[in-house]
Amino acid sequence: MKHDDDTAPVVRPPSYRWMQLIMGIVCMAMIANLQYGWTLFVNPIADKYGWSKAAIQVAFTIFILTETWLVPVEGWAVDKFGPRPVVLFGGLLCALGWVMNSFADSLTMLYIAAAISGIGAGAVYGTCVGSALKWFPDRRGLAAGLTAAGFGAGSAATIIPISMMIAKSGYESTFFAFGIGQGAIVMLLALLMVRPPAHVPGALKKQTKVQQARADFGPSQIIRKPVFWVMYVMFVLVAAGGLMATAQMGPIAKDFKIDGVNFNVMGMVLPALTFALAIDRVLNGLTRPFFGWVSDQIGREQTMFIAFALESVGILALYYWGRDPIMFVILTGLVFFAWGEIYSLFPATCADTFGTKNAAGNAGLLYTAKGTASIFVPLSSIITASTGSWEAVFFVGCGLNAAAAIMAWWVLKPMRKRFMDTAVTPVVSPEGADLTAAARLAN
């Protein structure tokens, strides 16, 4: 078999794809701090320059937007040129962004650095998820889940060293050292990444338990398919519903009188909110490969129905019983566990539906739903301010997840089956016109 990165056919052992997956997970862990470690730098930056925290956090918003909305372009580049150049480019930009942060003496420079970091992180994220989908056509849910878990929980191992270095050497040196170090690791691993072959050694497609497309569609074609927009709406519903609850855990804990309660955990005294968030981060990482694996066994829509329904119940239960400290910890864990799986289920479902060839670009296009959902998160603060209670926020979050669960079973499942039963690979003219109908008549 021949890879785009090779000059001659190379026979790879079946275990080779697991090496590619592990490299992708490590790359995801290396870029996780750009999002999850940022909070450690906000106070030191504000103390040095006197900028407001709101102004500093604009940089984080810019990072999220560039990291999310440019993934379709970066995914297209992966499908066309392979993973190596895109991850090299992404690792370089991630390093450059944090090095610029170490020297940023104006908000403008901080914002530019955030945009550069976001573009780099999106390139790495989109490539690693897309490659996992291609290397594991028989285990897409598990592969996408493990890769996404690298990003979701990847900062766990480095968050303490970063915090200690900031205290000892200052945030500037920390930005510089970790930017260079993390970027270098990503770039070195990029040199070992190759494009998955058409027939992956070790992939047992005959044993795949979920229906998969017999045709390949590109991003410009899937946006014309109603089934894509059903998935997109469901992604937005679950992401927004979960974010409206999870993004407000601090204020919710304060209003529920939880923030002053402490837990003794193996000799360590931790505030209830800190304890809950530590557990939540772990569960938010574990849920991605877990539900991804479940979906490989019983089907995507069935798993979506279970997870989204569980999220709906968890949000409602948190409102009614979350004022008890122990129940608050347990139920916030349940909410995070039933929410994070969207980052494995939707990419896998997208690749199953629209084919492997353009899996990175297609998954990237669907991933923009995360950015769309984030727009609705401030509504939770507006609703609470206008009603004087969290009740409406919890009920809206519960309702959005319930609607997505119903759509998964009664809308997406039959629609996807009809689409994949009849879909053929589009025939496109050199000018870009879709000639599929004419090709059918000719045959």
Image (cartoon, rainbow, N blue to C red):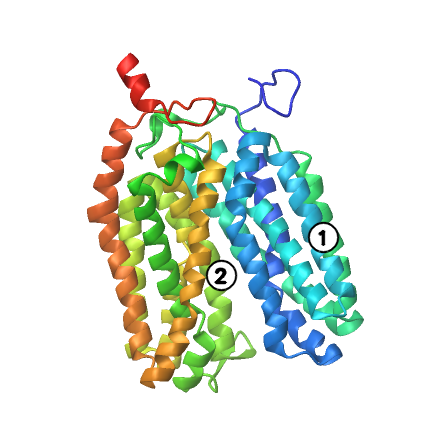
Q: In the rendered view, does 284 fall on the left or right side of 321?
A: right
Residue at image location 33% in from the left, 23% down from the top: 436
Q: Quadrant of the C terminus?
A: top left
Which numbered marker is on residue 282? Answer: 2
Q: Is residue 443 visible?
A: no
Task: Give whichever of 333, 126 is nearer the camera.
Answer: 126
Q: Residue type at mark 1?
A: Ala
Near mark 1 (Cα within 10 A), the count class, few <14, some 14-19 or many ≥20, is many
User: Residue tagged by mark 1?
Assistant: 95
Residue at image location 56% in from the left, 24% down from the top: 13
Q: In the rendered view, does 419 fall on the left or right side of 247?
A: left
Residue 165 x %, y %: 75, 68
Near mark 2 (Cα within 10 A), the count class, few <14, some 14-19 or many ≥20, is some
Residue 127 x %, y %: 56, 41
Earlier along the polypeptide chain: callout 1 or callout 2? 1
Residue at image location 52% in from the left, 26% down from the top: 14
